[in-house]
Amino acid sequence: MTTGVGGAVGRRPPGGPRPASARMDGALALVTGAGSGIGRATAELLARRGARVLVLDVDGDAGRATAEACGGVAYQADVADQGALTELAATVESRHGPLDVLVNNAGVGLSGRFLDTTKDDWDWILGVNLLGAVHGCRAFGPAMVARGGGHVVNVSSALGYFPRATEPAYVTTKAGVLALSRCLRADWARAGVGVSAVCPGVVATSIIDHARFRGERARPETVQRVRDTFRRHGLAPARVAAAIVGAVARNRAVVPVGVDAWVGWLLAGLVPARAGDRLAVLGRV
């Protein structure tokens, strides 16, 4: 699967070259969670690269604002609702034609040790972060596989491969997204469908403003410190958007974004489990 200058996303012959161009002229791309942050930056970049962009967000007003900014079409749905995404896939096919690029980006944050979080907390974050990606792949993947072309990007996180004692729910969802992506990549490659996992480190987006904090993590000083860290030291969403578009153009499997993400990725493969456990306990952000 590749994109070429002047051509939409299509099937790459097995063993064929992967052009470096990230042009996507005429490709139809859908981005979830595109009302703000990484999703909005990705929608805007895809539009600049020539794609026809569909914007999906649970916040209808935010989604419409992004669509207006990038010349796209907005849809409103909750990615945690499988039925809604299945219905959306049928609507997209009938109104716009076959989807070429799916970016499963929608996500929420939850900070708190395991015993401080509730079933409702877990249902919420699993529904959006992990099942949201599953639902997107279930809704749009079959047509890509049947057609023999397309690309899916699932936005994971550096915490998907580097655990933290204070973030078990978030880590679990993002590790699941990473595992899902690698499994689907292995499965769908024979059909000419690419699957990538993009794993950013800390990103300066509004996700932190809407995150849930539980237990000791809910102390005002802790919440403020975490939010300040995101705002002051987080990556610009545009950097992650560039990594997402690059992953599609080059059919990359796993793409860490940012120094912290790359360090974590390298350490995950090199650091013994016991040392990794100590680092998970010591993490402070």
Image (tube, grey):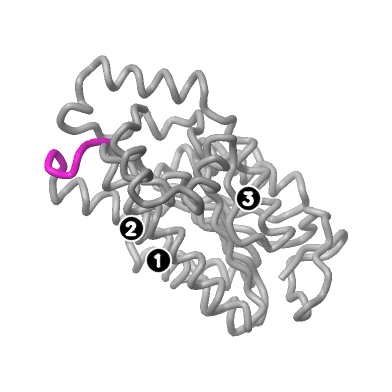
Sequence order check: which comes first, mark 1 or mark 2?
2
Q: Which residue is mark 2?
A: 80
> In the picture shown, does residue 229 fall above or below 43?
above
Residue type at mark 1?
A: His
Q: Nearer the viewer, residue 173 or 77?
A: 173
Q: Residue at x 68, y 51 (%)?
A: 245
Quarter of the figure that contains the N terminus: bottom right
Q: x, y (%) of residue 195?
A: 58, 66
Q: Which residues are magenta?
A: 110-117
Quarter where residue 228 is shown: top left
Sequence order check: which comes first, mark 3 or mark 2?
2
Which numbered marker is on residue 11?
A: none
Which numbered marker is on residue 135?
A: 1
Which numbered marker is on residue 244?
A: 3
Q: Nearer the viewer, mark 1 or mark 3?
A: 3
Whole-Å distance between the Cαs marked 1 and 2? Answer: 7 Å
Q: Are marks 1 and 2 in contact (CB under 8 Å)?
A: yes
Q: x, y (%) of residue 49?
A: 77, 49
